[in-house]
Image (tube, rainbow, N blue to C red):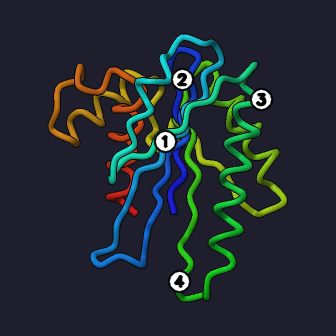
Amino acid sequence: MLHLITSKDNNICYLTILINNLTNPVKIRYWFQIHSIVNQIDPEDYETNTNKFLYNYYIEDNIPDSIRNIANAIINRHAEMQSRPEDKQEEEIIISACEKHINSEVVQYLEAYTMTYNLTVESIYRLMKTSNEEDIINTISRMLGVDNDKIDDLISYSYGLYTIIDRGR
């Protein structure tokens, strides 16, 4: 199970997937939790939940509050994973790909909240050996075969990055 945390302009996005094994074929939904530090996004932009995408929107006072709520979601998903039979459990990966100036802070907060569950957080900057967000966007664009301007908002950035990382697992 991949947990991806991204950020842009005082907004933090937690993205993972929800799988419904009871349907045939198996249905996968991409679950976006958008945490806004300032009320600058219209929640109505994210209220359209389709069979493929699920959005939840939250307004937070600060980054630690956002990360605590995201960490709680990850911990709950981890508990759900641990309750499955051993052969149905997946490897869990938490990746932080936030803007460079807050990425280390986000990684520290996430690790503090998830440490007792033996969950570690990888920084995208260490993982991809890149130094800035532009390099990551260029890499994602090339790998997806799209123009850079197609991944200029938080949702498309998160989804594009998730798609790339999930391919390599």
Mark 3–mark 4 contact, CB under 8 Å?
A: no
> Label 1 sits on what residue type?
Phe
Answer with mark 2 or mark 1, whichever residue precedes in sequence: 1
Q: Which mark is residue 32?
A: 1
Q: Is residue 131 above or below residue 89?
A: above
Mark 3–mark 1 contact, CB under 8 Å?
A: no
- Tell me the element at label 1: strand
- Tell me the element at label 3: helix
Quadrant of the image occupied by residue 39: top right
Mark 3 = which residue? 64
Using the numbered discs, state the Cα–Cα distance from disc 4 to disc 1 in whole angstroms. Answer: 24 Å
Q: Position of residue 133 (x, y in %)?
A: 43, 24
Residue at 80 percent of width and 55 percent of height: 115
Answer with mark 3 or mark 4, whichever residue precedes in sequence: 3
Using the numbered discs, state the Cα–Cα distance from disc 3 to disc 2 in whole angstroms. Answer: 15 Å
Q: Position of residue 164 (x, y in %)?
A: 33, 48
Mark toward the viewer: 3 or 2:
3
Q: Which mark is residue 88?
A: 4
Mark 2 = which residue? 99
Answer with mark 4 or mark 1, whichever residue precedes in sequence: 1
Answer with mark 3 or mark 2, whichever residue precedes in sequence: 3
Using the numbered discs, state the Cα–Cα distance from disc 2 to disc 1 in whole angstroms. Answer: 18 Å
Depth check: give the residue in front, 41 or 137.
Answer: 41
Mark 4–mark 1 contact, CB under 8 Å?
A: no
Residue at 39 percent of width and 55 percent of height: 29
Say few, some or many: other residues with alpha carbon within 10 Å of mark 3 (under 14 / 14 to 19 / 20 or more).
Answer: some
Residue at 71 percent of width and 46 percent of height: 71
